[in-house]
Amino acid sequence: MHLAQELVAYAERLATAPDVYLKVRAALDDDRVSSPEVADIVSTDPALTAALLRQANSAYYGYARKIERVDRAVSLVGRDHMYELVLDTSIASVFPGIAPQRMDMKRFWQDSLRRALLARSVAARIEDIDTERLFVAALLADLGHLVMYVAVPDLMATVLDAQAAGGESLADVERRMVGCNFAEVGAALSSSWHLPVSYGVLIGSQLNPTAAGEYARQAALLNIVGAVSAHAGGTPASCYPLHPAAAGIAGIEPEAVEATLTFVKPQLDLMFAVFSPG
């Protein structure tokens, strides 16, 4: 049996948050930092620079002239979308070439982006919900699985077989056979990256929002978004169950979240094309 922290420690290359993400995030959070100064930080990372220029020159923005300068791209894309781009690209840099057995990496990243964009879209329409916090938590929500597939691949293969053959939820089978589930591992990874405590709470309690304390409403919304997004991606409900109290705590029904998928799809297609971790 394994503790979540043990799995994170074992997968050593996953244990450090990308430096460029921390620097750009700090700059974006500081209103005194100008777009050219943000651009200077972005320019230190070739992959991030390329992704930013690809997005700025995409049909989504419809700018007639080619954008070649990073500072102009930062201004065009805007700070909110810069958060997404920096986090997406930075996470990809932490997992270069990782392709665990029995894990479709293209689908993994597409599911992560769908969940995050859906979370942001829904959160923007609800009062007293931190949109950025929920976006980040949703994007990172399933990283625990990536750690588990890297750290204990054979055991996870057994977990998948056992879950498919029985009626338990995937998280329950993980807890029984591995000693922890993906949400707990994700929370441990968030802690090892020294991300704000709120992210770890949301990720760790996404399957049981009643345990999230002051963040219960956001955790409940994350649970609903996770369940709706998983279903949209073809994942069985047993792999990401909707908590029975989630709708009441979040103040929104799953059907309302599901209706938002139509508006998210164009941006998902754009972000996945730009991000395209391969």
Image (cartoon, rainbow, N blue to C red):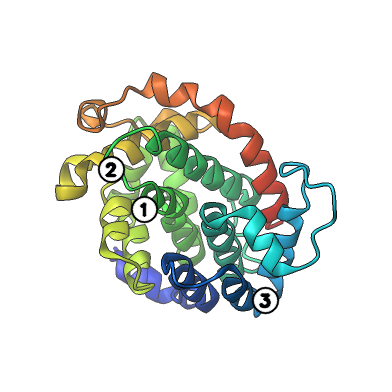
Quadrant of residue 71 within the rendered picture: bottom right
Pointer 2 or 1: first along the chain: 1
Pointer 1 or 3: first along the chain: 3
Mark 3 or 2: the one toward you: 3
Q: Is residue 69 visible?
A: yes
Q: Is residue 276 visible?
A: no
- Between 4 and 200, the one lying in front of the other is 200
Helix, strand or loop at disc 2?
A: helix
Q: Is residue 254 above or below residue 209?
A: above
Label 1: which residue? 133
Label 2: which residue? 218
**Residue 161, position in %: x, y?**
47, 42
- Between 134 and 187, the one lying in front of the other is 134
The circle drawn on residue 43 is: 3
Helix, strand or loop at disc 1?
A: helix
Mark 2 neighbour class, 10 Å CA radius: few under 14, some 14 to 19, many 20 or more: many
Query: Residue flagged by tag 2: what amino acid is it?
Result: Gln
> Circles 2 and 1: CB distance less than 8 Å?
yes
Pointer 3 or 2: first along the chain: 3
Query: Looking at the image, which residue is at 52% across and 47% down?
Result: 112
Taking the image as shown, residue 178 lies to the left or right of residue 208, namely right
Query: Looking at the image, which residue is at 33% across and 48% down?
Result: 130
Query: Residue flagged by tag 3: what amino acid is it?
Result: Ser
Query: Looking at the image, which residue is at 33% across and 44% down?
Result: 171
Q: CA distance from mark 2 to mark 1?
A: 9 Å
Query: Residue flagged by tag 1: what amino acid is it?
Result: Arg
Q: Quadrant of the C terminus?
A: bottom right
